[in-house]
């Protein structure tokens, strides 16, 4: 005997992305703001001045990728229960990518899912992490291996929050902008080569272009079944670097920058990218003082860590490799010998020979 449950339905998870000054934001019910002490000290008064809600609560967690854990999620959920939030309540993720990822994940779990909005305060989160509904935490096996797709109700990108951003955080965000250009938009990459994002209105132009690119990709492939995986260019290598260094040495965008250099090296090795193009990408990253080299302690261990990547399946490792500048290829056919040969170049002892 068979009993079918028919659940076919259309769900509209569309939402607006506002770029510009923070407008008045109104909620009918309770609101919890998830942030960290640094962001709260710098920007919380501005947010509270724009917010109107029945009740507003502040949940503060420590700043840093090392706190992006299930233990922190449990702390956030406990505070949400303490404040008696309900299914009509909302959560505001107010901070960088770590806050956005955990705020989205906590809101997807609380009462089986409540609304949340993203108000990103770092360049990396404004151009990438806040858009697309990817939420989650890290564990000892790797980065973002526990999580859910949970789209925000809205994203508010106010570039004035970036005025207090440290130089390293700025560079980390630039890495994600470069990623968008190399994979999807050659003319945008050429614009990045010719312009400095620290001058005039260039930064806002770049933010708009990067967000537009990310939005179009998410529209086509929300759950990362195909095209959206291309946005992980640099991440397959970068996530291993972050895990090996316990998320304490590099910012996420810095690891991605090194990962792009590694991916470009592999792409050049198999004929997808000319060496001169790889050098052009490296030059743009270097303009913002991003790290371009990681000394791999153990090539075999680094290689085996790829199998925990979410894009890989069974015994095949999926790599996101640039096909020149402005195009991308997703492949699982690169031989282990070729990958290990490229990884071997990222060892100081090899360079010293």
Image (spheres, rainbow, N blue to C red):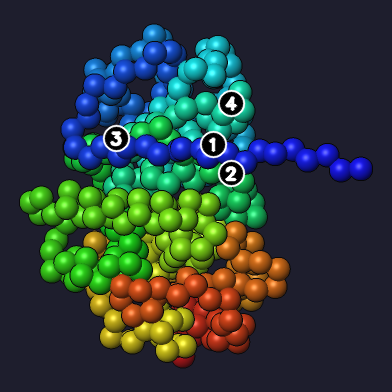
Which dot marks residue 147?
A: 2
Determine the secondary structure under disc 3: strand
Q: Is residue 109 left or right of residue 169?
A: right
**Mark 1 to mark 3 CA distance (whole Å):** 18 Å
**Residue 170 to residue 184: above or below:** above
**Mark 4 to mark 2 CA distance (whole Å):** 13 Å
**Residue 269 to residue 323: above or below:** below
Q: Are marks 4 and 2 in contact (CB under 8 Å)?
A: no
- Lower position in the chain sequence, tag 1 or tag 3: 1
Which dot marks residue 156?
A: 3
Q: Which residue is mark 4?
A: 110
**Residue 334 to residue 8: above or below:** below
Task: For residue 291, say whether it is visible.
Answer: no
Residue at image point 41% right, 84% down: 272
- Front residue of this view, candidates 272 and 64: 272
Q: Are marks 2 and 1 in contact (CB under 8 Å)?
A: yes
- Lower position in the chain sequence, tag 4 or tag 2: 4
Q: Are marks 2 and 3 in contact (CB under 8 Å)?
A: no
How many residues crowd around disc 3 within 10 Å: few (fewer than 14), some, or many (20 or more)?
many
């Amino acid at each position: 005997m068979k009993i079918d449950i028919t659940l076919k339905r259309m769900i509209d998870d569309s939402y607006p992305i506002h770029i510009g000054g923070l407008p008045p934001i109104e909620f009918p019910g309770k609101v919890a703001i998830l942030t960290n002490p640094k962001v709260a000290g710098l920007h919380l008064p501005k947010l509270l001045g724009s917010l109107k809600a029945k009740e507003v609560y502040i949940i503060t967690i420590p700043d840093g990728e090392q706190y992006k854990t299930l233990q922190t999620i449990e702390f956030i959920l406990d505070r949400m229960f303490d404040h008696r939030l309900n299914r009509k309540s909302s959560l505001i993720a107010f901070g960088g990518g770590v806050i956005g990822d955990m705020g989205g994940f906590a809101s997807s779990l609380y009462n089986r899912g409540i609304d949340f909005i993203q108000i990103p305060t770092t360049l990396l989160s404004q151009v990438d992490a806040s858009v697309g509904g990817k939420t989650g935490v890290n564990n000892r096996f790797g980065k973002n291996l526990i999580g859910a797709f949970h789209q925000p109700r809205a994203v508010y990108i106010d570039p004035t929050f970036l005025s207090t951003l440290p130089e390293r955080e700025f560079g980390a965000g630039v890495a994600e902008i470069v990623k968008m250009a190399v994979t999807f938009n050659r003319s945008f990459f050429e614009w990045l080569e010719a312009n400095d994002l620290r001058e005039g209105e260039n930064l806002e132009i770049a933010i708009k272009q990067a967000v537009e690119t990310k939005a179009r990709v998410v529209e086509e492939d929300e759950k990362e079944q195909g095209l959206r995986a291309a946005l992980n260019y640099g991440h397959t290598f970068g996530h291993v670097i972050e895990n090996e260094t316990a998320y304490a040495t590099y910012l996420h965008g810095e690891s991605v920058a090194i990962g792009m250099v590694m991916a470009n090296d592999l792409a050049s090795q198999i004929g997808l990218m000319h060496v001169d193009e790889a050098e052009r990408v490296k030059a743009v990253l270097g303009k913002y003082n991003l790290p371009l080299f990681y000394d791999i302690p153990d090539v075999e261990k680094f290689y085996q860590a790829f199998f925990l990547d979410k894009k890989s399946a069974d015994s095949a490792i999926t790599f996101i490799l640039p096909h020149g500048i402005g195009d991308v290829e997703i492949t699982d056919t690169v031989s282990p010998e070729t990958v290990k040969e490229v990884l071997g170049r990222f060892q100081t002892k090899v360079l010293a020979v």
